[in-house]
Image (cartoon, coloured by chain):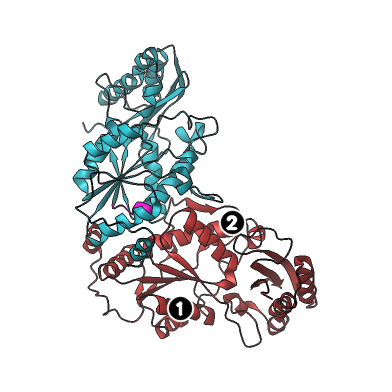
Chain colours: A cyan, B red
Amino acid sequence: MSVLSAAKKVFYLPIMIGEWDMATIVETVAAMRVLVAEARQAGKSIGFVPTMGALHAGHLALMQQAKKNCDIVVVSIFVNPTQFGPNEDFTAYPRTWAEDLAVCRSAGVDAVFHPPARELYPDGWGTWVEVTGVTDKLCGRSRPTHFRGVATVVTKLFNIVQPDQAFFGQKDAQQVIVLRKMVRDLNMVPEIVMVPIVRDEDGLAKSSRNAYLSSEQRQAALVLSQGLAKAREMAAAGEQEPAAIREAVLSHIQSAPQANVDYVELYSFPDLAEIAVLNQDVLLAVAVRFGATRLIDNIILTPSRT
Amino acid sequence: MSVLSAAKKVFYLPIMIGEWDMATIVETVAAMRVLVAEARQAGKSIGFVPTMGALHAGHLALMQQAKKNCDIVVVSIFVNPTQFGPNEDFTAYPRTWAEDLAVCRSAGVDAVFHPPARELYPDGWGTWVEVTGVTDKLCGRSRPTHFRGVATVVTKLFNIVQPDQAFFGQKDAQQVIVLRKMVRDLNMVPEIVMVPIVRDEDGLAKSSRNAYLSSEQRQAALVLSQGLAKAREMAAAGEQEPAAIREAVLSHIQSAPQANVDYVELYSFPDLAEIAVLNQDVLLAVAVRFGATRLIDNIILTPSRT
């Protein structure tokens, strides 16, 4: 294949599928293309888990699902500057490379793509992927350029890794919705697989940003999962009014004095359309600040079948 | 491969590479994916010529180059609505399907992708590829959404056809520049190959829009190629001043009374940066209206090596 032979001319890597070290570290696009071409030539399917590192049990669940579904698993660890707003936590975002690599190795990942920022955003770079419609609400309202950065970097990573399936957590439900729309609208090949939220025993959704929380904030943050559990009970008991559920969740979250609510909203899933009554799958999503730390959580309410 | 087997479940096509009819007609994305997967499995390289139909000798040159470079040649014929502005000639654009198919067959094309608009832009569609920087000048100034539509549809077609190489005419030099930037910025796999302009014997660049011209307008339109030829002579004779060349070309074009100049401009090639002196490759590009018909032409001036 021309791509393979061209890449080999420049970056000869004597690597055969099945003989990779566990979690081969790849830092350049050209080297990644060689691995992908080798996998393709060997008829192997590729599962891809894009991450920004600071890996936790939620990411591990993505890797485990990828291992189940695909022959080869590639994880990317790249803190993507273009999805952070100018006043967001790009520089402060936790970077835990050694631990991340150990997590990937323990999960049996085949390759970790870990490029420097210059490799993906060289001088003169400037092409964006813009998903419209589902990006202007929920997190898109308070983070207006966030999903443009996500869609753009995922497009780039898909073109580099060429996966059959890519794995994302339900924790970022709107991200899954945006990326599924992007894949459909641009006729991309990879399937977006959504993996359930992983929680601590007390209910807090796993997040790299939990590391920012003081112990008081962490305790207060339990109102998110508690509020969502309350909503699930209300829906199961037959509550049909989105406004009633929203009010109950909001007032529970606001019972934590440190909680600064960004949004508590219900939309149809996966279209993110306004809803008047709970007669279809509904995404109940919340975003709340505790000090400088913004946490999100969500639940998908299915209409009771009774 | 999962993509192939999934596609075959829905659209079984008993087609083997090497046994295709000349210019198999493909109208759905799913069927195109089957052909592409078969070609890939057989180890064949794919050359792709995206067109809007109304094929002429310029398109034929693209197909011939594709035949030379690649094992399999796919031509798309799709008048892309998203690259026309609201007051442009989308509905009037010439559609000559039977003749186009004959041209593809005469050129030995393997497959013609000819989807209905709904296949590429279904209800709820809305994801755009935006190339910045090189899109805000030349044709991008008078057609502000044009290159967004081009970049978006080419992204979609690349994801569907998955070519090794894609062939575009130098006639649309800015389009080539924009698409090369898009491929680089988004890490796409296909190589953009630029094929020289094909001209009528009297110098008029081949264009589907030439069909709109009255015989008087067609005669007047020769000032474009004549102006560019004059510029080439001036550069070969040592003229270094972009402004001097621009003035000479502009005044020659304006000697045709029907000519309504959109632009006559010189920029560095391929960066489209401002230039003070002709000491590098320079794109001299012109756009001129004759009545309602807008024609473009260009030349790449290389610094004299003397």
Which image quarter: residue A287? top left
As helix, strand or loop, the secondary structure at mark 1 comes to: helix
The residue carrying mark 1 is B65
Q: Magenta region: which residues? A: A159-164
> Quick check: B105 above or below B185?
below
As helix, strand or loop, the secondary structure at mark 2 comes to: loop
> Quick check: B225 above or below A211?
below
Residue at 28% x, 53% y: name it: A164
The verdict on residue A163 being magenta is yes
Q: How many marks?
A: 2
Across and down, in percent, residue B220 comes to: 73, 81
| Amino acid on which the number 1 mark rests in the picture | Gln
Residue A138 visible to an observer of this rendering:
no
The verdict on residue B196 being magenta is no
| Amino acid on which the number 2 mark rests in the picture | Thr
Across and down, in percent, residue B274 comes to: 69, 58
Q: Residue furthest bottom?
A: B201
Residue at 50% x, 64% y: name it: B80
The numbered mark 2 sits on a residue in which chain?
A: B
The residue carrying mark 2 is B145
